[in-house]
Image (tube, grey):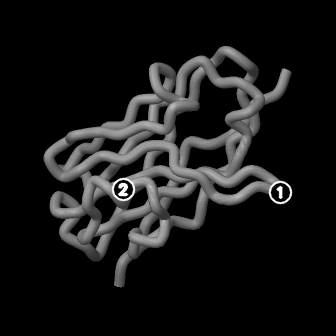
């Protein structure tokens, strides 16, 4: 049984940082592409970032240069370092895993098989 548990969300002031973690179990973590998606109230879920098993990373334009994704295969954990937060980053952030992703679909949530429950990130002054 696959489980994915996020942590690290919370309340942050604009311009500050948060680091999200997602630890997975029940799968061969190193073989999976891991991603972060987010969903703000009243909006559709959107791609944030992804990292392939070979550590190649991808970012949404809205977070490029501010967010950094990384993974520690020895700990079955993927991280999202979020710097320079702004109020538009407020959302529920969820991690996702896929063993069948290709580059053209990496931003498409339909191609991810496993999801965490999500962690709330609120950016407010």
Residue 28, horizontal then vertical, whole percent: 19, 69
| Badge 2 or badge 1: first in the primary sequence | 1
4 lies above or below 42: below
Pointer 1: residues within 10 angstroms few (<14), some, or many (20+)? few
10 lies above or below 22: above
Q: Residue furthest bottom?
A: 1
Quarter of image, res 9: top right
> Residue at the location (76% across, 55% down)?
43
> Residue at the location (43% across, 66% down)?
4
Left or right: residue 2 compared with residue 27: right
Residue 38, horizontal then vertical, whole percent: 61, 51
> Residue at the location (43% across, 43% down)?
49
Local secondary structure at mark 1: loop
Number of callouts: 2
Residue 116, horizontal then vertical, whole percent: 51, 65
Residue in the foreground of this view, choosing between 28 and 36: 36
Left or right: residue 82 compared with residue 91: left
> Residue at the location (25% across, 60% down)?
102
The residue pinned by badge 1 equals 42
Quarter of image, res 62: top right
Local secondary structure at mark 2: loop
Pointer 2: residues within 10 angstroms few (<14), some, or many (20+)? many
The residue pinned by badge 2 equals 106
């Amino acid at each position: 049984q696959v489980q994915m548990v996020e942590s690290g969300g919370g309340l942050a002031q604009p311009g500050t940082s948060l680091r999200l973690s997602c630890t997975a179990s029940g799968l061969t973590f190193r073989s999976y592409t891991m991603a972060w998606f987010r969903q703000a109230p009243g909006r559709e879920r959107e791609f944030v970032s992804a990292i392939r098993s070979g550590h190649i990373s991808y970012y949404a334009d809205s977070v490029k240069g501010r967010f950094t994704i990384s993974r520690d295969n020895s700990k079955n954990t993927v991280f999202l370092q979020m710097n320079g937060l702004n109020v538009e980053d407020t959302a529920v952030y969820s991690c996702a895993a896929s063993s069948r992703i290709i580059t053209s679909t990496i931003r498409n949530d339909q191609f991810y098989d496993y999801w965490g429950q999500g962690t709330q990130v609120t950016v407010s002054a």
